[in-house]
Amino acid sequence: MNRAIVAIVSLLFVAAIPAQAAPSPREQQLLDLVNHEREKAGLSRLEWNDRLAQAALLHSRLLAENRDLSHQFPGEPPLPERVGATALRFNSVAENVAAAPSVDVTHKGLMASPGHRENILHPGYNAIGISIVERDHELYVTQDFAHTLVAYSEKQFQDEVVRGLNQSRRAQGLHALDVVIDSRLRKAACAQETNTDKMIQGLPGATSLLVFSVSDPTKLPEDMQKAAMDKALQKMNLGVCLQTGGKTGFSKFWVVAAFFP
């Protein structure tokens, strides 16, 4: 058997967390190798992320303990939950695991494997955390990749939504909408309520109501943008609720918006 890479498994997704700050020399070496590959491919460098490194460390310890490669050992949460438990804001995540005698051999093996190479060179990721745990002269390696998000508070997010919509309206010669931050709509957003017919009945005068989830306030769905451009509208009631971690680990904001003439 070629001992270069005993086994490598790739997992790609469209507890207590140990402290891990700066990368160790080996982890820094692997980070530099990853970013060198990305630069050669014309991609942006991945930023080291302490929270991803924390999740990777927990997993590398299990790799070494079990002397085996897996993305989920018995009793261990799946990758999105492991990363979500660190409180990182993200909307996509992937993982490479490997076992090899050295960092160079690890990297060469990962780059030779199409699935792992795809993770390393994925243009959608902007952050990485790496953990290397040694046992019996073997390095057990976890690379966690993610697309991290700006850590908006609910107020910051709703302010950006309002600012963006009214900026678009003014650019079209329309007056800005009067905006009411509605606690009832926030409650519906937190409950991920989707019965728009029922909700609009409790909002006399509302002509339309939208419910959606999004992670970037500058990338609103088309229906929201169209509604904002309606010249007959005068007012919008808005409720925003942050959903993070939980069963999926992914972060997003649920939004309920009601429009009035």
Image: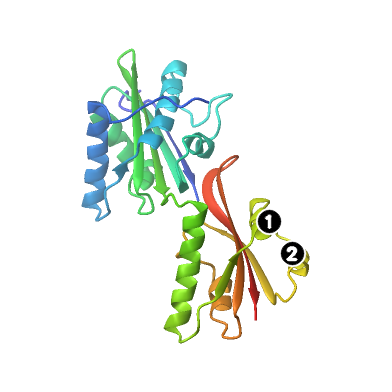
Q: Are marks 2 and 1 in contact (CB under 8 Å)?
A: yes
Q: Which quadrant of the rendered structure holds the N terminus?
A: top left
Residue 53: x %, y % from top left: 37, 33
Residue type at mark 1: give it: Ala
Residue drawn at point x = 72 percent, y = 65 percent: 196
Q: Which quadrant of the rendered structure holds the C terminus?
A: bottom right
SS assignment at label 2: helix
For label 1, the residue is 188
Q: Is 69 on the left or on the right of 33, as rendered? A: right
Sequence-first tag of 2 and 1 = 1
Residue 255: x %, y % from top left: 59, 60
Residue drawn at point x = 35 percent, y = 40 percent: 128
Q: Residues within 10 Å of mark 2 (few under 14, many from 20)?
A: some
How many discs mark residues in the rendered view? Answer: 2
Q: Farthest top residue?
A: 136
Q: Is 102 on the left or on the right of 9, as rendered? A: left
Residue 92: x %, y % from top left: 46, 48
Q: Is 43 placed above or below 57 here? A: below
Q: Is 21 placed above or below 41 here? A: above
Residue 183: quarter of image: bottom right
Residue 75: quarter of image: top right
Could you give the CA–CA distance between mark 2 and mark 1, rounded to whole angstroms? 8 Å
Can residue 186 be seen here? yes
Q: Nearer the viewer, residue 103 or 234?
A: 234
SS assignment at label 1: helix
Residue type at mark 2: give it: Met
Residue 256: x %, y % from top left: 63, 62
Q: Is 259 on the left or on the right of 23, as rendered? A: right
For label 2, the residue is 199
